[in-house]
Amino acid sequence: MPGLTWSLVWPPLLAAMAALLVWPLFGPVLALALFAACLLVLLAHHAVNLRALARWLVSPPGTEVPEGSGAWGEVFNAIYESSRMRSSGQLQLNAALERFQRAAEAMPDGIVMLNEAGQIEWCNPVAETQFDISNRRDHLQRITYLVRQAQFTDYLAAQNYAEPLVMKSLRNPDLTLSIQLVPFGDRQKLLLSRDITQLERLETMRRDFVANVSHELRTPLTVVGGFLETFEDAEHIDMTQSRRHFQLMHDQTRRMQGLVDDLLTLSRLENNQEKMSEETVDVRALLQVLYKEALSLSDGRHHLRLELATDRKLLGNARDLHSAFGNLVSNAVRYTPEGGDIELIWALHDGEARFCVQDSGIGIEPQYISRLTERFYRVDRGRSRETGGTGLGLSIVKHILTRHQGRLEISSEPGKGSLFCACFPARRVVA
Ligand code: ADP
């Protein structure tokens, strides 16, 4: 600052020049006295400004820089400029930090920042719920003191973080977490946790599904394979006995065919990319066809009745509706003992259209009802198989109804009978 040097030098120089001018006129004593007085004023000026500077230095941050004159004016200006730049830098830094914190808080995954000693420096709300820890309460607590699970402590101690750790949450055993440790900075660590409960559930469903399909196919294949082996080893074939064997093999292949058909239907329904084609379905005509099919399936063993209480039609997919209604009707026939009553009803109810199948069959215990639409779920496995069931029928019905924004209502009483209703919203009903 060249200006500052000049501002410091010129006042004493001016005082010296004034003393030199006075000297020849009033003598040396007065000249020196004038010079001393000027220096005193200057000293007092410096003292006042120095005090203002000292006060400002100990004042709280944000206090305004004092105003000064002469060289002090320049000093205070320079201090003001630098403090202004520093506080704007600080503000930017604070804003960036706040943005980062808000982003980390909004993350759907848990984040815990650990220091070198494995103590919690910060964590987001998701991590708080997943690990049952608190950002405020547990600050600088060792994470291993709070998450006391052997696999977790072993994972942290092993120092091999290439693979994530999958573990159940201690607080909520229904929650499955995938945990990954990422070292960063100066021996700090970032603990990332992700809720993979849904993924795990899907994986279990996939495994169960493959196991179920294999199991369902194994029995008929064993039967057919067994008969074929017998034929292979036989010297000569007894046609009367063989006819019975062929019939059994035929039954088993029909069973496999039914299973494969149902699996293909399910896979088509689950493929959401394919848009459902819609038309106005004449439900009365459809139910008359189904009624005839039921008569032939029942083969005179039941009293069947068809009640068409409305002539309303339905906006939907004819093939899918035939399949859904057909499943409900065939279930009623299969699960109603000889002599029982089965009623098919098409009616309007509270603006909704309903197709209901009422039977006086074996009925279902209440605890099983909510599981009936699960794939391969059967109350009585033996009876289902005997009557040609695949365990996929109601699952198909549920999918079809969902695609029509409808729902399946089930009420049943063991030993008395069941009522299955396919309900459709008013907007699907065509006058
Ligand atoms: P399945 O091919 O075994 O009949 P579904 O998915 O159609 O498979 O039905 C699932 C289970 O629901 C059946 O195994 C049976 O136990 C029960 N169920 C379905 N409909 C009836 C009914 N009308 N009466 C009694 N039980 C039924």
Image: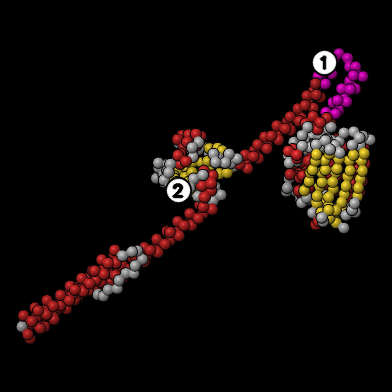
Check if residue 237 falls in the magenta segment.
yes
Q: Is residue 199 left or right of residue 213?
A: left
The residue sitting at the top extreme is 235
Question: Percent from the top left, x then y, of residue 420?
Answer: 82, 43
Task: Where is residue 190? Give x, y as percent.
Answer: 47, 45
Tell me the residue at 24%/71% (across/down): 49
Q: How many marks?
A: 2
Residue, disc 1? 233
Secondary element type, mark 2: loop
In magenta, the rendered stretch is 227-252
For badge 1, the amino acid type reads: Asp
Q: Dividing the picture into quarters, in which one does residue 36 lie?
A: bottom left
Under mark 2, the amino acid is Arg
Quadrant, the N terminus: bottom left
Q: Position of residue 237 (x, y in %)?
A: 89, 17
Drawn side of residue 206 relative to residue 394, left or right? left
Colour basis: secondary structure
Q: Main secondary structure of the magenta part?
A: helix
Kindly identify which residue carries mark 2: 137
